[in-house]
Image (cartoon, helix red, strand yellow):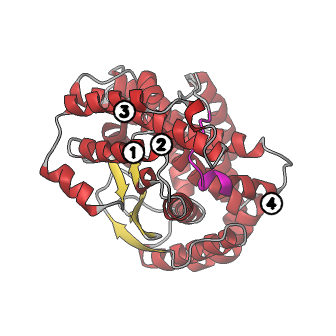
Amino acid sequence: MTPHPLDAIAERYVKLVLAVGRHDADYVDAFYGPAEWKAEAEREPMPLAAIDADARQLLDDLPPPRAIESTDGGDLVALRREYLRRQIAALRARVRMLQGPPLAFDEESRALYDAVAPRHDEAYFEEILEAIERALPGGGALIERYDAFRAQFVVPADRLPRVFDRAIAEGRARTLTRAPLPEGERFTVEYVTRKPWSGYNWYHGRYRSVIQVNTDLPIYIDRAIDLACHEGYPGHHVYNALLEQQLVDRRGWIEFTIYALFSPQSLIAEGTANYGIELAFPGDERIAFEREVLFPLAGLDSTRAEDYTRVRALVERLAYAGNEAARRYLSGEIDRAAAVAWLSRYALSSPKAAEQRTRFFDAYRSYVITYNLGKDLVKQYVESRGEPSSERRWQEFVRLLASPPPRLGARD
């Protein structure tokens, strides 16, 4: 294979990501490239100032677009160049954060993820809460009524594996009808505790993942499909497997053997994982599968499936409340107790779940925007390209998964 002008840039980029990982334990989310590169990074740690200087030089050395226009690959190579440019720029931003004071929330999200989440005031969420009040009439605080309502839909701990296994199998079957997956792809599920997140996909290369499900808090029946799709099919597992198959194995693009968590790639990764849920289980199909399959497996009353779905759809409209809580908390406008209170009021999170969410803010900061804004941007991108059919949406979705992530556009 003839070396491409971007290949040397890509190798230097991977080594710089590994170097940052020596200073930031969360930065390298996955790596399955040459083992000697990782060993070298561990053996000879680079100071942050040196990493930044090398990254600045790497941006200067990036071939201009006109230098690669005539190379094989066309638009895909152009996307590759732009992907490397944005990833390197975000790496420099992360290094600056590790060296000095934190950036303002929106400034940080723009620097790391090339996106800024819209702002919503209390009145925006109050209007949604009024609709939920009407759906859950009664005395007492709304959060108390909501918690009592949801308590009827908790999956018993001894039934979790069978419920998740069935949801995963269905998500995989639906994905396989639309997206041929690499032969031998697979993942295993582990149940863990004491984590700031509810689920996590650890990709190990060769089309293998380990998916961890946090059982610190009650797991409600809707989380079975959410986690099965988000972490597995057609979410993170499929995304990583297709990148490895299409870009690493077939094209030799080494930069895709590493995943820098705090980078624009995460906007695509989390956005496609969340959009993939409704793509795999659209509308009434999800309700039917939960009612007819998952509710009985969990030992829950399947006649309540529609009620639960109706309330859940209203609560999902509060998704951006977490962003506002993070923005205020991380800027120092409110303390942890106030952030917990905000999440309880405007995200309808139980106090324990809200406390866990603030620990996520501590660890991952503005990463929170990648879930909801990422989904909205991916949805807009996929559904604006061609006819609004399920088949066409799947085609555009799979194309997005298996290519260098495009710039979906920063939002203010």
| Cα distance between the residues tagged 3 and 1 | 10 Å
Label 3 with label 2: CB-CB less than 8 Å:
no
Mark nearer the N terminus (3 vs 1):
1
Mark nearer the N terminus (3 vs 2):
2
User: Does 138 sit left or right of 371 as displayed?
Assistant: right
Closer to the camera in the image, 314 or 242:
242
Q: Which residue is mark 1?
A: 8
Q: Which circle, 3 or 1, is nearer the viewer?
A: 1
Q: Which residue is mark 2?
A: 5
Asked whether residue 300 appears in the rendered view, the answer is no
Q: Which circle, 4 or 2, is nearer the viewer?
A: 2
Mark nearer the N terminus (4 vs 2):
2
Q: Residues within 10 Å of mark 4 (few under 14, many from 20)?
A: few
| Cα distance between the residues tagged 1 and 4 | 38 Å
Mark 2: which secondary structure? helix
- Looking at the picture, how far across and down is residue 382, in whole percent? 72, 46
Q: Amino acid at mark 1?
A: Ala
Mark nearer the N terminus (4 vs 3):
3
| Cα distance between the residues tagged 4 and 2 | 36 Å
| Cα distance between the residues tagged 3 and 2 | 13 Å
Q: Which residue is mark 4?
A: 391
Label 2 with label 1: CB-CB less than 8 Å:
yes
Q: Which residue is mark 3?
A: 58
